[in-house]
Image: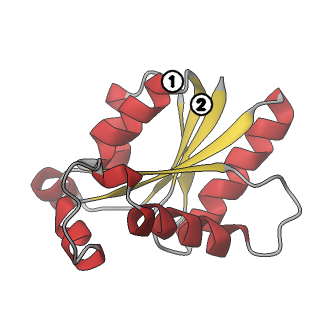
Amino acid sequence: MAIVAAIDDSERAAHVLREAQTLAANFDEAVHAVHVLQRSELVEVLEKDVEGQALADNYEVQQIGENIVSRATGESTLPEPTVSVRVGDPAAEITAYAEEQDARYVVIGGRKRSPTGKALFGSVTQKMIFESPAPVVSVALD
């Protein structure tokens, strides 16, 4: 089993990762940090042909996740998490990763949104609460 921390490229990532590391220490589990790139973001990362290579296996794509985790952990003395970068719909990719890792918990950062914002744009946190194969810990950040 593992504790899966769903991180984005913001200062919220440090809070999510810290909460995941706390849970991992309490349950003697490994931490897995997963970052999901949407295809539109991928265009900015890749300027070369990756024919025959899974996008998430690409070095530049993996470096994005490593850099985000490095910034989020800062000077932490806690063990480094396993890092994975996925490409696609964030809720679907995080759910799939949590299933693959037999996650004990999924830790995700929540944001306050207006009812209209939720209705128009959806919410990764909201989708995760309903679709996750493991309990979701939402770290309130705003």
What label sits on residue 105 in the rendered view?
2
| Most distant residue in the right direction | 77
Left or right position of 82 against 128: right
Residue 122 on image: x %, y %: 20, 51
Q: Which residue is mark 1?
A: 134
* Disc 1 to disc 2: CB gap under 8 Å: yes
Can see residue 142?
no
Can see residue 118?
yes
Residue 21 on image: x %, y %: 75, 48
Instruction: Tell me which corner region of the image, top left, top right, bottom left or bottom right, holds residue 8.
Output: bottom left
Count of residue discs: 2
Which residue is found at the position 36% from the left and 51% from the top?
56
Which residue is found at the position 24% from the left and 70% from the top?
41
Which residue is found at the position 59% from the left and 31% from the top?
105
Give the SS element for disc 1. loop
* Mark 1 surroundings within 10 Å by alpha-carbon count, few (fewer than 14), some (14 through 19), many (20 or more): some
For residue 104, above or below residue 107: above
Give the SS element for disc 2. strand
Left or right position of 107 against 24: left
